[in-house]
Structure formats: structure tokens, C-alpha cells
Amino acid sequence: MKRNGIGLRTMVATAAIFALTAGTTQAEELRLLTWGGYAPDDVVALFEEETGIDVSVTLSNNEEMIAKLRATGGGGFDLAQPSQDRIAGAQEEHGIYKPLDLSKVDSSLFIASMLDGTKKNTEFEGDVYGLPHVWGTSGLVLDTSKAGSVKDYTDLCNADVAGKVSYRLKRPTLIGFAFAMGMDPFAAYADPAAYEDMMKKVEAKLVECKPNVKAYWSGGDALINLLRSGEVVASMAWDTGGWKLNADNPDITFVAPASGALGWIDTFALPAKTKNEDAAYKWINFVMQPEIAAMITAAAGNFTASKGADAFAEEGLKARFQASFPSEAIDNIKWYPPVPAGLEDIEGDILDRVQAS
């Protein structure tokens, strides 16, 4: 009986230790929902070594992030990285995020203007839901030796590049064409009827331009291959794609459009049902350190909102950035504001009709 009693006590103690260990293991995991390049293996390894927290990375994009979080009511992940214009509207419609505790963030690590702007653009009902991380622009990626006439988005419809153009059937194309046509889509965000009328004008232009399109690209690698092969000489794409191509072919590069490149900022946002909020804040403060942020720039190709991180960036990337963005082009960037609820339904209908035309 004594031996059995000892065995029972041992079993109970072992079960208790197992439960505590299992709980600790679960608690010390950061489930990150992010974009490719934002959590490179070397950065993850350094974070895990410093904190003892395991990082599980799920790669996604804006549409998929919102869909995943909607499906779970904001569960399944501890930290997400939607673009700043996808937070306030998604929160109003679906309640998939939770407010940030700014006292847990080292604000000195951030470029002040980007931090202030993102806090403003991700505010909902008095609370801040997003912090800036990676930023960049979309505009024109051109073979300048063959597409010299292309200075703005609508120039992709020029006769001299017919059949050698590519862009995505996504909202940036609608926004870019609207600006190039002399309209201001961001100013119309508050008036859905006016915005729809504007988008119908863009629809007509895109339908007219359709014969110029070699392919509507959906993946960056596919577009890069088209530009490298010469099948496409003029495109709408992200700055990083143009800089990557420029490293191999000096004729191909990113050009800021005359009406302005479209600027985006991907954020840090807490899903509503995060289970390891402390780990999320530790990750934010870790990756915003200048040396670590430069490692993310090397992997993603985009600069971050980390103050002073550019000092650690690769010299070639800095040179390409300066060539694409003289001061006047930077001043002309059109930064995406938050998307009001329902606006993307209008855009989706327009894009569907362009696709079907």
C-alpha cells in the first residue's frame, strides 16, 4: 500500500509538471501572420535565442489576413501585419483586432513621422490599432530603353508599348489610373456614390487599354520573368521589383509616376484573440532595432520605419532608392488612407467587369 501510495503521488506530480510544461510551451510561442521577408530565418533565430520564445510564421497578404481573422473572430494568431489602410475599416466591420498598449512599445525606435501618421490612420473609436513596420511604394517598372514615353500610369495605354504591358487587376491599379486621369480617389473615400462614378471612368479607361496588356500579373516572380525576357517593357509594380531587376539590367528600373507613386505601410496589429500578447510586443521592440530592421530590409527589399536603420542597409539598395526617388518624387507620394467599409465591394465589381470585358 505504501509503495502504491508513493506511485500515486509520483504520477500526480508528474502529471502536474507535464501540465505546467505544456502550458509554458504553448504560452511561449508567437504565432505571426505576415508577409514574405518580414520574418526572415536569421531574425527569427536571433529572437528565439534572446527570448526563448518559438516563432511560428504564416505567410499571407492583406486579403488572406482579413479572411483568416474573420473566420476565427480574430483568433489563431498573436500578431498580424496588415497594411495601415486595412485596419480601421476591418475593425469597424468585423472586430478582428484589439487596441494596442503603447506603453509596451519603445517609441524611440520608430521614425516619428511614420509612427504618428500610422497611429492616426489606424485609430478607431479613440484607440490605436496599428504601428508602422515595412513601407514602400508601387508605381512604374520600365525598360527605359524601350518605354521612354511612359511617364504615368495611363501612358501604359500608349501605342508604342502595345502588347508589352502588365499590371494587376487589383485596387492599386484603379487608384493609380484615377490619379493619372486627374482625379483624387482618396478625397472621394467619404462619398461612395462619387467614388463609384470615379471608378466607372477608370473602368472605361482600363477596358480601352486592355489590348495593350500582355498579361495581368498576380505574382511578382511571374512579372519579373516577363520583364527579363522582354515580353513586357512597361508595368505597374512595386519599387522593390524594379530595384531587383535593375541590379541585373541597368535599363530596367522603378520610376515614380508623374501623378505620384502610391505609398503603403504594413503594420503591427494585435488580433482580437491573441493568446501571447507579451510575446507580440517583444517581437515588435526586437525587430525595430536598427541593426535587426536592416536585416529585414535585406530580406524584404523594403525599408522599415526603424529610426536609423538605413545606416545599416546595403549600399546598392540605397543608391537605387535615391535614383528612383528624388526629393520631389518623395514629396509627391500618395499615401493610402484607411479604406472605408464597403468601398472594396465597389472596386471588386469594377475589376470583375474589366476582367470579363
Image (cartoon, rainbow, N blue to C red):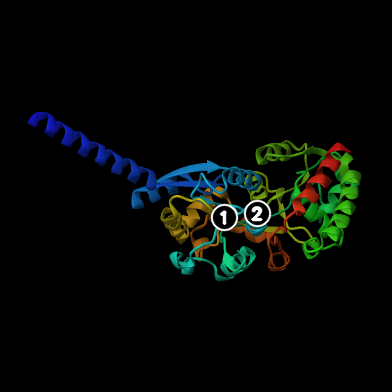
Q: Which mark, residue 194?
A: none
Give residue 338's position: percent from left, percent from top.
Answer: 68, 60
**Residue pictured at 25% horizontal, 41% vertical:** 16
Image quarter where the N terminus lies is: top left
Give residue 267's position: percent from left, percent from top.
Answer: 57, 57
Crowdedness of circle 2 by 10 Å Cα count: few (<14), some, many (20+)? many
Give residue 148's position: percent from left, percent from top.
Answer: 82, 51
Q: Judge whether 226 appears above or below 179 on screen.
A: above
Q: 31 or 342: which is nearer to us?
A: 342
Is disc 1 placed on a helix, strand or loop?
Answer: strand
Residue type, mark 1 in image: Tyr
Look at the image and tell me whether residue 150 can be seen. Answer: no
Give residue 78's position: percent from left, percent from top.
Answer: 48, 50
Image quarter where the C terminus lies is: top right
Residue occupied by mark 1 = 97
Residue type, mark 2 in image: Ala
Q: 287 or 282: which is nearer to us?
A: 282
Q: Judge whether 16 appears above or below 337 on screen.
A: above
Residue occupied by mark 2 = 90
Q: Judge whether 202 appears above or below 164 on screen.
A: below
